[in-house]
Image (cartoon, coloured by chain):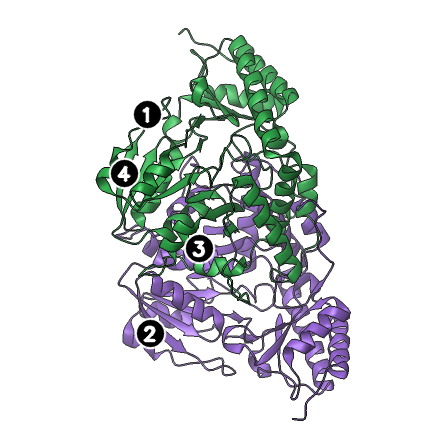
Chain colours: A green, B purple
Amino acid sequence: MLRPLEAPLRHLFGPGPSNVTPRILAAGSRPIIGHMHPEMYEIMNDIKKGIQYAFQTENNMTIAMSGSGHAAMECAVFNTVEPGESVLVAINGIWGERVAEIAERSGTSLLGLQTPYKKGRFSLIAIEKHKPVLFFLTHGESSAGLCHPVDGIGDICRKHNCLFLVDTVASLGAAPIFMDKQNIDILYSGSQKALNAPPGTAPISFNERACHKMFNRKTKPISYLFDMTHLSNYWGCDGKPARIYHHTGPVSGFFALRESLAILAEKGLEESWKKHKEVAAYLYRGLEDLGVKLFIPDRVRLPSVTTIAIPEGYQWRELLSYIMKHHQMEMTGGLGPSMDMVIRIGLMGYNCEKRNADMALNAFADALKNCKKTKA
Amino acid sequence: MLRPLEAPLRHLFGPGPSNVTPRILAAGSRPIIGHMHPEMYEIMNDIKKGIQYAFQTENNMTIAMSGSGHAAMECAVFNTVEPGESVLVAINGIWGERVAEIAERSGTSLLGLQTPYKKGRFSLIAIEKHKPVLFFLTHGESSAGLCHPVDGIGDICRKHNCLFLVDTVASLGAAPIFMDKQNIDILYSGSQKALNAPPGTAPISFNERACHKMFNRKTKPISYLFDMTHLSNYWGCDGKPARIYHHTGPVSGFFALRESLAILAEKGLEESWKKHKEVAAYLYRGLEDLGVKLFIPDRVRLPSVTTIAIPEGYQWRELLSYIMKHHQMEMTGGLGPSMDMVIRIGLMGYNCEKRNADMALNAFADALKNCKKTKA
């Protein structure tokens, strides 16, 4: 404790957090102001506008959580579902598992919809059959490296009076998502992926259908901290003249998030999507040239996080340790259902450059050359 | 959005957040590393040691929440209480009200113990009578400016098989607290008061009695994010060899918290307590010289946050606006039950200096001179 703080410089080429840009680090290190000063409300308004742009939505009920993606996940479930109601969760990786766990703890009647990896589609007949109040889908499945198609699902949900909740933590800014056009009722993301802000804040937006459901509950949401009645007031979204103290938001985290959203707005979404697609394609070619196999078919690959099937004869832990030790570079193994199946490389936002893909490819080739290979 | 981030320099002399020291701002702006890198675990170990020192405890189950004081509050209640169990809450200001609200949402049978301001004591006969599983008390009541005595209460709780939960958000580092000696079973604090870190992290510690209760539940805690089974693993407190991914902690926030705890350890608790007491006494004298009345009797005053009875004939909002406009200085009004009753001045940690007390007194005198006074 009585020695200086140590934190090495690293290439964070895993599934996140990714490297934070110097401009965002600088924003996060500014002297703070009070969480309820008028200037802070201006910054929160900027964040709101930035999220509306990134989500492609005009929803008024658009805020950032004082917490990571899991806080947004719990906020979405806690506010829109009441005990005894039915929730349908598409499980195409770890995030579906997590939402299922959260929904179950909330006393809902849970239906898990197992969706096989590599397919990126499943039958939505369960929505018609079970009439859940909420259907969850992960758009950017970082544990699988899957970008799940979203088109058309919102319409089916609407037809059956079900809210459509989508997780875009790993895909925001990297793969197109259009909250309003795609009839997504609740969308959330994280700060530490393609937005390149430090972890600890999470954009979330609710449309009018979602607001109608969550503000006409019979019971209070289980969490006071994540209660949207209070959060909507804190963020000036409830139309009331005064904001009442609810909790103290992460002022520095909001400075950083504001700046990261400003950078995305300056660059433009189209440009950001294009860049991720190009650099990902470049990485795929490089990996295939090394003779390794990609885990997910091209059609549904997530451009921000690439999953590689573990090369035959290698121990994935050994490859990753080698890359960390010799290249100060993070790549990671699988997570949840993809554990022991894949190695993951993430090139997101600021990190999404061909020169970084080259560095990652070079490190990976070096590891393949120098790590022990057992006979397959 | 497409303009630079604006945040003015302010003297944050309200009840928090307080100004962040340059050294802590610098720590929080370092390039981040992964939330599960070995170097991050070292930093988390430092945080754990720093909290153990600040709390005066040897509890192994000592971590920082990825959220502000409210996250710690919900974590404490969610993990130690099951639906149907009985909770007793001492309400000596807003924080008791908040815990009561949280406990009620958790489906507990709630008993509120109204404790009059200015007394700093109440009868604990309710513990004997109702046998709650948890008794909550705020040590540093920032809305009232009260530092509630804690001695002896832990023993009574222990005798009646009740856990003793204490909020020390506003008092940690400013007024003595001895978690182990005072038989406090669960203690939590915040980062943004006398620790002078940005808001967004919150120290919390559980002793063995609390662990026994929370790890022998029949039901899972309602929140996955705040589930201590997972958080204890993330923080390496559960004795298991591997840490499994739970959520992504606020890496920059932990850098900053680590540094703030290091500063407290370098300075020493005794020295910090002494300094707060001296500067507070100096502020009291100065305020009395201005002819204003302090709200809380000397015996139970909180050294970090001083409450002033609103001077007769003045509008508190006008005084505070004047001070903000002409001195770029935050003082605040009351909160919750103390609303419209007090003005609050906080001089915490880095801000706790006689020169700052002089500045605050000067600004307050200036406001009294220049703001409209109606005939009393």
**Sequence order check, earlier mark of 1 and 3:** 1
Cα gap from disc 1 to disc 3, whole angstroms: 32 Å
Comparing A192 with B172, the one in front is: A192
Cα gap from disc 2 to disc 1, whole angstroms: 54 Å
Residues under numbered marks 2 and 4 in contact, where contact means CB atoms less than 8 Å apart: no
Label 2 or label 1, whichever lies nearer to me, is: 1
Residues under numbered marks 2 and 1 in contact, where contact means CB atoms less than 8 Å apart: no
Cα gap from disc 2 to disc 3, whole angstroms: 30 Å
Residues under numbered marks 4 and 1 in contact, where contact means CB atoms less than 8 Å apart: no
Q: What residue is pinned by disc 1?
A: A116
Q: Position of residue B101 (x, y in %)?
A: 39, 66
**Around disc 4, counting alpha carbons within 10 Å, would you say few (fewer than 14), some (14 to 19), or many (20 or more)?**
many
Label 2 or label 4, whichever lies nearer to me, is: 4
Label 2 or label 3, whichever lies nearer to me, is: 3
SS assignment at label 2: helix
Hey, what amino acid is under mark 4? Ile
Question: Mark 4 belongs to which subunit?
Answer: A
Hey, what amino acid is under mark 2? Ile
Q: Residue furthest bottom?
A: B376
Q: What residue is pinned by disc 2?
A: B127
In the image, residue B309 sits, relative to residue B266, either above or below, namely: below
Label 4 or label 1, whichever lies nearer to me, is: 4
**Around disc 3, counting alpha carbons within 10 Å, would you say few (fewer than 14), some (14 to 19), or many (20 or more)?**
many
Question: Mark 1 belongs to which subunit?
Answer: A
Q: Is residue B277 left or right of residue A74?
A: right
* Label at residue A127: 4
Asked if residue B236 can be seen in this view, the reply is no
Question: Mark 2 belongs to which subunit?
Answer: B
Q: Position of residue B76 (x, y in %)?
A: 41, 58
* Label at residue A226: 3
- Same subunit, labels 2 and 4: the answer reads no
